Amino acid sequence: MDFNLKKLTSDAGVFFTRAVQFTEEKLGSAEKTELDAHLENLIARADCTKNWTEKIFRQTEVLLQPNPSARIEEFFYEKLDKKIPSRTTNGELLGQYMLDAAKDFGPGTPYGSTLITVGEYQSRLGGAEREFLQTSAINFLTPLRNFLEGDWRTISKERRLLENRRLDLDICKARVKKAKQAEAKAAAEPDFQETRPRNYVLSASASAQSSGGWDSWDLEDSKESANVMDQRKAEQELRVAQTEFDRQAEVTRLLLEGISSTHVNHLRCLHEFVEAQATYYAQCHQYMQELQKELSSANSDTYPNSFASNANPSTSATCPSPVSSATLPGVSPPCLASTSTPGIAREPSGPLKIQDVQQPSTGHRKAKVLYDYDAHDTSELSLLADEVGAAMVHICYGEPFGTCCIM
């Protein structure tokens, strides 16, 4: 118990003297030992690396897991050294909802079968996202976290120790300076034996010596000896403090120079992160292309007229109407072929208006509306699915491609 109390008292005294030295340095009343320029540059570079690494790490966490509650939960699991539970991605959840909806709507219906197809691909996209998150967390986030929680803590600890060694060194320098000033002051004071008159004779000198009359001179000698001893002790402490400061500065310098290898390691991790992103987006692109093909083929089987343009995309842009104008006398063709014949004027390729369509001179034809259509302006007419009538022939030529089917 006594040893602990003495150690506590000693530590408190050291802390107090360091605090006094630090305060005097801030106030400008005490000298401060400056570090060499190379070490200062290393410290500035390390601080910059730490700050930007922390920002990149936090923002990457937000990118991979936008939900803050989920990030907090994962943080507590990591601190408790427990395995993070598997979490369903949004794509997988959406795919499961679509599959469940298809069961209720009926897998044999067009909507239900399409929901099954899209739901399966959404689940694939969710699986690709899960793999991307795991790969990014292992190859990119983990090295950044190890630097912030491992290497940087060691560097910070050694830097604090270096600062304490510097304060101790400056305290020792101040003590040596103070001891030298006290010695110089004592040397400047006049000596009593040298300044007294030559004919000065002490009466009863023998009795004075026997009674201790020379104690004042002995006191002066003891003060001078004490000043010399204090100066020697301060100089010895200064040499020890300088040695410890130099040793700690070298240790800190070696750790700070290791930041270069940290940059190389983070560069490799960054390449792996970009590669994981490229793989993930390539998989998503492939899945979406396959999904588009399946939906196009399924829609072509269900609605052959409305998706006829997908089979020949080169002519769909120039001739949107599936009905030949030759079968309807008096009807002007909506557009011409992409190839022009010399001597024949090209018809304007603008949208066909209802008032431009003339009624056929002979025959009675009917049209059936394939799906609902809402008019966008006053020149259009809203249609309902499965409407059939002769009057619909006139309307169909003015409506968007694929809305009606001529019977």
Image (tube, helix red, strand yellow):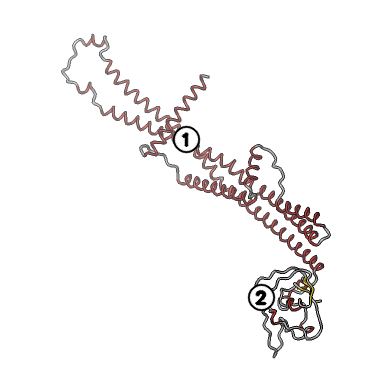
Q: Quadrant of residue 348?
A: bottom right
Element on which disc 2 rests: loop
Q: Is residue 307 visible?
A: no
Residue situated in front as seen by the camera: 401 or 151: 401
**Is 368 situated left or right of 5 in this image?**
right
Say whether residue 308 is left or right of residue 31: right
- Amino acid on which the number 2 mark rests in the picture: Ser
Dot 1: few (<14), some (14–19), or many (≥20) neighbours within 10 Å?
A: some
Say which mark, if any, is on residue 356.
Answer: none
Q: Which residue is mark 1?
A: 164
Q: Which part of the image, by quadrant, shows the C terminus?
A: bottom right
| Residue occupied by mark 2 | 379
Comes first in the chain, label 2 or label 1 = 1
Give the image location of residue 155, x and y in percent. 54, 40
Q: Position of residue 263 (x, y in %)?
A: 58, 49
Front position in the image: 338 or 239: 338
The answer, for residue 12, to whether it is visible in the render is yes
What x and y, as percent, mark residue 151? 58, 42
Number of callouts: 2
